[in-house]
Image (cartoon, rainbow, N blue to C red):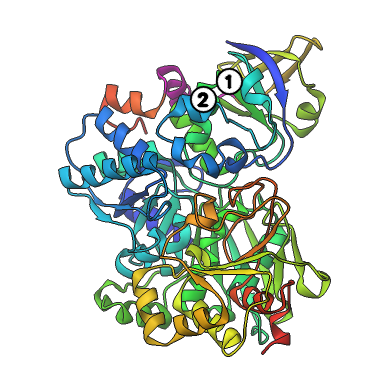
Amino acid sequence: MLKGKVWKFGDNISTDHIAPGRYFHLRSNLPELAKHVLEDAREDFATKVEKGDIIVGGKNFGLGSSREHAPRIIKVAGVSCVIAKSFARIFYRNSINIGLPVIEIKENEIDDINEGDELEIDTEKGIILNITQNKNYTFIPFPKFINTLLEIGGIDEYVKKYGDYGV
Amino acid sequence: MGKTMAEKILSFHAKKDVMPGEIITVDVDLAFVQDGTGPLTVDQFNKLNFEDVKTKSLVFIDHASPSPRKELSNTQSKLRGFCKKTSAEIFDIGEGISHQIVAEKYAKPGDVIVGADSHSCTAGALGAFATGMGSTDIALAYGLGKVWFKVPESYKIVLNGKLQKGVYAKDIILYLIGLIGADGATYKALEFSGEAIKDLSMESRLTISNMAVEAGAKVGLFPTDEKTKEYLKMQGREKDFKEIFPDKDAKYEKVIEIDISKIEPQVAFPHTVDNTRNISEVGKVKIDQVYIGTCTNGRIEDLRIVAAILKNKKKAEDLRLIIAPASKDVYLQAIKEGLIDIFIKSGATILPPGCGPCVGVHAGVPGDGEKLLSTQNRNFHGRAGNPNSEIYLSSPATAAATAINGYITDPREVF
């Protein structure tokens, strides 16, 4: 069960917004790089985000680079989950691989969620409870392989444990 | 049932018939990283206690090349150390951009190629299932020799007609992305076909496949033909040729037909690649810096077009013109043909082969309020290293014409 307050972002939040190229030299120092997470979309995000907070984005969240640093610093910053109308492919894959839950819900439900709302997410049942508005949103629960990856902390931990992919 | 190119290649590598939507594990023929994503790959490779790589594995130092800061020098040393310790091969500074070198020296029709760089889809031009993924994925590809995939559905992009003079492959792909949107093909395999593709050189196809990811696609595939054969022969790799084409009854989720003779030169406005306009609708946009190069348009064909426009002409006085060949081989060829001479005399600054200005790492970072016109593949906010600048995207011809006039210019006016 994940629980946290919402930070809202718009459509087409790119990996350049999340992990700007001008901090390229910090990529081997994720805690330092995380101090600039999403800086080009919202300057105060990195300083104000709190552990457990939830990012709610629009369409095509995470488009652009293959840099795994993007979901990694979102996780390092304490974000527990990213919910969006849709995700770019590589960002989605990277997030699952590193154990950051990424959830797609309907456009009108995303539009319904406000900045600062408190959400509670059951990834196994596929239910998001908007505590602030007392509403429920549903999503298709992850397949078993992905749920296992999220539980175990990522594909690296999975392969370390089982020696191979689970598919 | 017939198969698309993606389904054929993945079935062969999974050693079973695969269907769209299925999650599979496949052997990979080639895996690579660059200096931005590579250090994390090495960390993960070590964390997983792998001892050596289990597939053809390459490391490219192309993003901060040569290194502008000590932190990057140290991570580059880590990559060099990894290549000494394992069977992975390094392409160090000056060699060129990963995607260009993969196309020149490694990619074979029918291969599965994975790279820790989103533009790894470039090699789809040679009929390889080539796609970008993250650092951990490549650490696993290195160590296990295989990766997991979801088999994509395919979109068939049918290109008909002939390009007008002054219109190029870059305009086709910008037009397509403008048409379907930056998420118009998310997760899908794009498969190019139609009578027009036989006229497209391998270099043009590489430009188109390179930008498949800008429409969200996993891969941008061209079937192989005489052009593929010629290109491989030119690279001394004739033996690597293999016929790869879709079955006649292959099932596509969508078919998009484009008459390329109707396409004008395209310009993508800030800050998304799908924010495209016909050049006739652009108006007078003053530009501070023009950058010609990158994995999208730094090939010899591009540099020849640029040289034809810049010959005996000067760049606009208050504009900076930066040109970078995509690889050492392209650079040497450009010197041999006298292109570099033309560029320097026109007022251009030549950079070593690499990615620097496109990723905002070094060399050519725009100032506050400045407008940059680039032949690169993306124009996201802050991409070139300064969030207070704007990036416009175009073909090399439009970029060269713009360099002369100082404002965005239709290349058909300067020929």
Mark 1 Cα within 10 Å, few/some/many (few <14, many 20+)?
Answer: many
- Judging by the rendered image, the residue that carries numbered circle 1 is A79
Above or below: residue B158 compared with residue A39: below
Above or below: residue B239 compared with residue B51: below
Q: Main secondary structure of the magenta part?
A: helix
Q: Earlier in the sequence, mark 2 or mark 1?
A: 1
Above or below: residue B34 compared with residue A123: below
Q: Are marks 2 and 1 in contact (CB under 8 Å)?
A: yes
Residue A143 in the magenta stretch? The answer is yes
The amino acid beneath tag 2 is Leu
**Residue B368 at x, y = what percent?**
69, 50
Residue B3: in sight, yes or no?
Answer: no
Q: Residue furthest front?
A: B317
Residue at (35, 65) in percent of width and height = B101
Residue at (65, 75) in percent of width and height = B403
Magenta range is A141-153
**Residue A83 at x, y = what percent?**
65, 27
In this rendering, position of residue B280 left or right of residue B338: right
Q: Chain of mark 1?
A: A
Q: Which image quarter: residue B408?
A: bottom right
Label 2 vs label 1: CA separation?
A: 9 Å
Residue B328 in the magenta stretch? The answer is no
- Judging by the rendered image, the residue that carries numbered circle 2 is A100
Pick the residue in front: B340 or A64: B340
| Count of residue discs | 2
**Residue B355 at x, y = what percent?**
47, 57
